[in-house]
Amino acid sequence: MLTVTDLTCARGGVPILSGVTFSVASGRSLILRGPNGAGKTTLLRTLAGLQPALTGSVEPGVDAIAYAGHADGLKSALSVAENLTFWAGVFGTRGIDAALSAFQLDALRDRAAAHLSAGQKRRLGLARLLVTGRPVWVLDEPTVSLDVASVARFGAVLATHLAGGGTAVIATHVDLGFDAEMLDIAAFRARAGSSDFDRSDFDEAFL
Amino acid sequence: MIRLLLRDLKLAVRAGGGFGLGLGFFLIVVVLVPFAMGPDTSRLSSIAPGVLWLGALLACLLSLDRIFALDHEDGTLDLLATAPIPLEGVVVAKAAAHWIVTGLPLTLAAPGLGVLLNLPSDGYLWLLVSLAIGTPALSVIGAFGAALTVGLKRGGLLLSLLVLPLYVPTLIFGAEVARRGAEGLAVVTPLLLLGGITAGAVALLPFAAAAALRINLR
């Protein structure tokens, strides 16, 4: 369950999106559409709590949200299993075997992340979502550098997550193989110069 | 936090992790000073505490930009910010890892290198004590500077300029403890001030660093 009410997202103090309101029920997913630069990443980072919203609210809070962005957050000197075990420890969960097998990384578990291909790194980055144990996934272009089989596999993992009562908000241009609601964020674009926020926060200029 | 600390230590000792970078630099400075100053042992022993402290400080400075920059580049910092650990805890764990990788080896190596500078025999204990108390402040202040410059490409120059003035009090009182110890004078006053600086930095700067990180992650 994710409810977003009247959210205004800014980048560098300039409002990009305003009045973003949507709700995703448990077991459902929402796919964000919009041209490059429309503010998909900004919206997702705001949902994940990485940048404060100018107005509006996101329910539930950031403690329920697992975020996966463009970068996978892997340490190339650590092995696949070590990378995943670290994140499992940080999020206070145990057992990485289910996450490894879900993305077919078992055979690679002792290989250093530096020696993985781009697609394998991406699969490892997505496997991290499974060890967070969080119900709401916020994903920014999750299928970049994945081949067709891996995209299908990711779609299956996502479907399992949703069937277990999870929720997902995904910015993607790829068909993931299951029906999801679509939201075109171009409709929420903040009009330049019309905002109250333009010069309201003098300190913002120095941050 | 413990997990993060252990991971950072593991990364530091793996290939390319930068363990020994500070130690190597410290060794080079201390070995080269007698060549530059000439072999006059009385002159060397009078400057030994200051040179050892300065070398340790510069060695510490050398590895500061690694504290957050590497994690920022590969996206780990974003993910840590959304993890259940508070960012203040992330800063403390990273500063502690930096100290264990840099400050602690410097402290342990300093007495050995003191021999090269003809450090008076009374000075070894106080050199060790002053570095043990002072270097944690260097790591925490450095973590604050690294947090301020984390989003910048090649922010190393700015980081050094930001951090150097903050390092001055630690250097003054740390070197003063070592100097007085070497000359057999009372060390209590500078030692208390050094301890106060470290305690204050460790208590306050993680909050400032976490606030700087939040702004830089936007």
Image: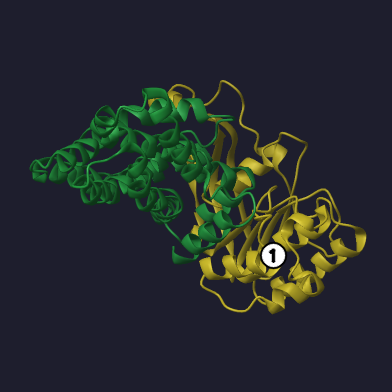
Residue drawn at (79%, 57%) of the image: A115
Q: Is residue B209 above or below residue B160?
A: below
Q: Position of residue A190 (x, y in %)?
A: 61, 31
- Residue furthest right as drawn: A148
Q: Is residue B61 above or below residue B200?
A: above
The yellow-coloured chain is labelled: A
**Which amino acid lies under the numbered mark 1 shown in the image of this protein?**
Ser
- Please tell me the colour of chain B: green
Q: Position of residue A94 (x, y in %)?
A: 57, 78
Q: Position of residue A58 (x, y in %)?
A: 52, 54
Question: Which chain is home to disc 1?
Answer: A
Left or right of B119, for residue A177: right
Number of residue marks:
1
- Do we see residue A207 in this rendering? no
Q: Is residue B145 above or below residue B125?
A: above
Q: Secondary structure at mark 1?
A: loop
Q: Quadrant of the N terminus of chain B?
A: bottom left
A144, A193: nearer the viewer: A144
**Residue A158 location, quadrant:** bottom right
Left or right of B126, for residue B142: right
Left or right of A51, for residue B141: left
| Residue topped by disc 1 | A79
Left or right of A2, for residue B189: left
Residue drawn at (71%, 35%) of the image: A38
